Image: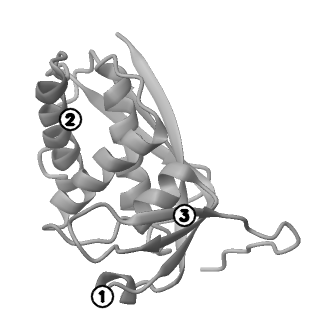
Amino acid sequence: MTRYSVSAPHKLLLSGAYTVLDGHPALGLAVEPRMHLALDTASNEPWPRDNPFAEAVRSVMREEAHRLGVLELPHSLGFSTHTEMPVHGWGVGSSAAFVTCLTHACSLAMGLSLDPTAIFALARRAHRLAQQEQGSGLDIAACTFGGLIGANNAHTASTPHIHLLEWPEEIGVLLIR
């Protein structure tokens, strides 16, 4: 059995949460706690067919395997996730962190060494697929690249313009549910 462990931050949308879908600029910020995901290539656990995000990642990674001419994911895969503290219902983008982590771990299991830009593109495709082609990708960008992210042209199926910005060190972030 081979285990691939990855992690990604969650995100906050600081501005433009819905207007970004109409073509306006938006800001997102990667925040703690991180989501940790472990993917086991010889698990006895069935792939969760009732999880649309997991199914979308598997579909996108299958297409990527065909495109690159590499081996597809093994049929016996299992994964587990955890965070240092519960974040369900906080609005910090658990689905984006999950899709980013699962995409990264699956790429490693396929023998691919992808840079963050490639992981972002695949994770964004999977996230949009799971959400019936909705979403700007700003949340995936924050989970993939970390830090403060600006996005423009995020209202179409084409790749949004992502800008890595500087967060002022003297300004802290405190999440209060």
Closer mark to the observer between disc 2 and disc 3: 3
Q: Which residue is mark 1?
A: 22
Instruction: Name the amino acid type tagged 3.
Output: His
Q: Which residue is mark 3?
A: 163
* 10 relative position to 47: left or right: right
Q: Earlier in the sequence, mark 2 or mark 1?
A: 1
Q: Earlier in the sequence, mark 3 or mark 1?
A: 1
Using a 10 Å C-alpha cutoff, classify the residue at mark 2 as few (fewer than 14 neighbours), some (14 to 19) or many (20 or more): many
Instruction: Name the amino acid type tagged 2.
Output: Met
| Badge 3 element | strand
Q: Which residue is mark 2?
A: 61
- Which quarter of the rendered picture does the C terminus lie within? bottom right
Determine the residue positioned at 33% across, 71% down: 136
Determine the residue positioned at 42% across, 19% down: 3
The residue closer to the viewer here, 152 or 71, is: 152
Using a 10 Å C-alpha cutoff, classify the residue at mark 1 as few (fewer than 14 neighbours), some (14 to 19) or many (20 or more): few
| x then y, percent, for residue 162 | 47, 63
- Work out whether 78 lies above or below 31: above
Determine the residue positioned at 28% across, 77% down: 155
Closer mark to the observer between disc 2 and disc 1: 1
CA distance separating discs 2 and 1: 29 Å
The residue closer to the viewer here, 153 or 12, is: 153
Are the residues tagged 3 and 1 within 8 Å (C-beta)?
A: no
The residue closer to the viewer here, 106 or 85, is: 106
* 177 relative position to 119: left or right: right
